[in-house]
Amino acid sequence: MAKHKIISQAEWLIARKAHLVKEKAFTRARDELSRGRRELPWTPVEKEYRFDGREGEKTLADLFDRRSQLLVYHFMFGADWEQGCKSCSFLADSYNGAVTHLAHRDVTMVTASIAPLGKLEAFKQRMGWDFKWVSSAPSNFNRDFHVSFTEQERRDSTGTDNYRDSSFPVEEGPGISAFVIDSGQMYHTYSSYGRGLDMLITAYNLLDLTPKGRDELDLDWGMQWLRHHNRYDDPNADDPIH
């Protein structure tokens, strides 16, 4: 841990109040950013995307479950993977408990992955989650929302990742997308990828309050330390993605 200056409680209070001014400015800037996000234009969803779920095949409109707003978390789980991405699992640990609260604010949240439904259900049971998880395999949903990449795109960096002409390092990438139904028409209102997902991770927000913070600067890559929550004591749980 870096060496810190040690001061009296009275001096600490002065420093804390000075930093509070910066925190308040950040809060106001974040509120303004959120307002701007809500004011982004919408684009109609013209395709009828289909998904496999526990209740059978569903359209994207069906996933709204009689609410007007829908959030879809794009969870990295390739068709031939044996388990889901550990970083996406980190996020899912955070939002699993929020789904019920969102439902009471006119928002349905579902998780979607390209893997077959059976694999998703088995992994969901292993992890102890209860959110709705659907397979996006029946349509081009993952491709159209830029979270699935071909081998050639990855080799030549010719895909689109986080609104750049690039490609994710593996065939599946993470993201979250928002949709709304207004006057019978469905619209895509927002998608976010990369560090834009940080706000969803409760554990990171808590770590940011601690003296060491996320403590990742000496790692080869940020989430290198991460494991599925049931594999921290497993010496073989060292795969960088899944």
Image (cartoon, helix red, strand yellow):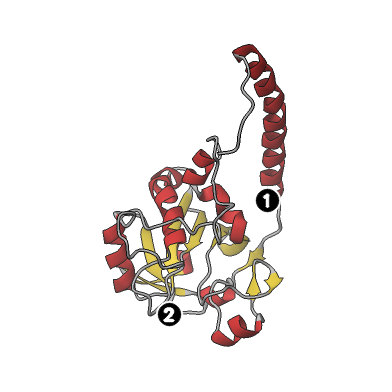
Q: Nearer the viewer, residue 219 or 202?
A: 219
Instruction: Indicate whether 212 appears above or below 158.
Output: above
Q: Residues within 10 Å of mark 1 (few under 14, many from 20)?
A: few
Callout 1 amino acid = Arg
**Residue 45 % position (x, y):** 59, 69
Image check: 62 left or right of 216?
Answer: left
When asked about the image quadrant of residue 101, the answer is: top left
Rounded to the nearest angstrom, the CA distance separating label 1 from label 2 is 30 Å
Tell me the quarter of the image containing the C terminus.
Answer: bottom left
Instruction: Indicate whether 195 appears above or below 116.
Output: above
Secondary structure beneath dot 2 equals: loop
Q: Which residue is mark 1?
A: 37
- Which residue is pictured at 55% across the width and 83% down the height? 150
Tell me the quarter of the image containing the N terminus.
Answer: top right
Whichever of labels 1 and 2 marks the residue nearer the N terminus, that label is: 1
Q: Which residue is mark 2?
A: 138
Q: Nearer the viewer, residue 209 or 114?
A: 209
